[in-house]
Image (cartoon, helix red, strand yellow):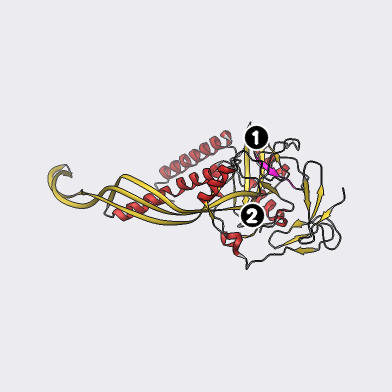
Amino acid sequence: MPGIEDKSTGKEERDNGDSRVRQFPCSNCGGSLLFHPGATSLKCPYCGTENTIALNLRESSYLKENDFLAAMEEEEKKSGETAPSADSVSCRGCGAVVSLGNQRSSDCCPYCGNPLSTQNRNSFRLNVQAVLPFAVDSEKALTAYREWIATRWFAPNDFRLRATRSETMNGLYMPYWTYDARTNTRYSGQRGDAYYETRMVMVEHNGKRGLEPRQIRKIRWTRVSGEVEIFFDDILIPASKSLPEHLQNKLEPWNLDKLLPFKEEFLAGFVTESYQVGIKDGFKAAQLRVGPEIGEAVRRDIGGDEQRIESSDTSYSNVTYKHILLPVWLSAYAYGGSIYRFMINAQTGEAIGDRPWSVWKIAFAVLAAGAAVAALGYYLINSGGAI
């Protein structure tokens, strides 16, 4: 079927059997455009022409806070209904649900490296409000990747060779929720105020024993109760289950002030993951994340030198949320039956990753360090301590 052009956006949609494939034709040569990291434009890989993405930054609806309770009611009403979907595939290895887009030729999962089956389709929920576009391009990502691999001194040699040989980095948009909430915490506990008593204690000096005065720290406890209110803004929660939690957390911080209105053009040339953590479960994760901060606020309110929190009850009000996409460069490789990943926060350029450890290299380093200490000791003994 011939392409159907949307005059308002310049997008072209082509019927591809099961779903529509979105394309963004170049205004100069008609080639499929890719998003240009670090800019708000699409760049043609054929003629180099940059096509500006139309943005209305005066319109702030893309940062609108959505009512959490209303969303829960709506979700219950629509349970069992089929949500609008876009073309997507799921990974049988890690369960990720991603949209590859027509510009992607890769058929491997960006999270675990397993082959993706285009026959294993899923509903792709893309009700995104805002996006943080890529600021780090593929060349910078590859450079950071090579530098990171080169400095993994205690990784097995064959792992370093295999990881360096692949040198594949996938540009990926990860789904996140942000939550705003006001908390009220009622607590009861004890406030501890330190004081000192002078006591005589037995001590020994030069072989002679005797009594000397010492200041002994003690705590006077007083029962207390009260309440603490805190407003939390943009509690950031990953809506993906495809990465280990420790790696997801290390991708932070993100500068959410740079968020832009969601435009499909920003996704051109990149993989986009659909959320796997729903709004309700995301809020449960948000409650766990703010728990320690609430506890610290309670301790400050109790005051004194030490605190005991015996009971606390937190209520949440004015809960709102947003659904956003954040950019990551990711490489995944299998080694020894496990999956190892290297990632770059594609806004800040911060690199993180995990790798296997070589037991032999670590043992050799320990032995070498022990030998160096022994050699130094031998030298000091035989030189009378002079260096």
Boundaries of the magenta span: 96-101
Percent x, y of residue 16: 82, 44
Percent x, y of residue 170: 70, 47
Per the image, label 2 sits on a secondary structure element best described as loop
Give the left or right position of residue 115, taking residue 353 as reference: right
Residue most toward the bottom? 58
Q: Quadrant of residue 333?
A: top right
Residue most toward the top? 337
State whether residue 179 is above or below residue 364: below
Q: Residue at x 38, y 56 (%)?
A: 229
Residue 346: which disc?
2
Q: Nearer the viewer, residue 238 or 280?
A: 280
Residue most toward the front? 77
Percent x, y of residue 54: 72, 64
Per the image, label 1 sits on a secondary structure element best described as strand
Look at the image and say whether residue 99 sits in the magenta stretch.
yes
Give the left or right position of residue 352, taking residue 117 as reference: left
Q: From mark 1 to mark 2, how far is it between C-alphas?
A: 25 Å
- Which residue is denoted by mark 1 in the rendering? 335
The three-letter code of the residue at mark 2 reads: Ala
Percent x, y of residue 167: 71, 45
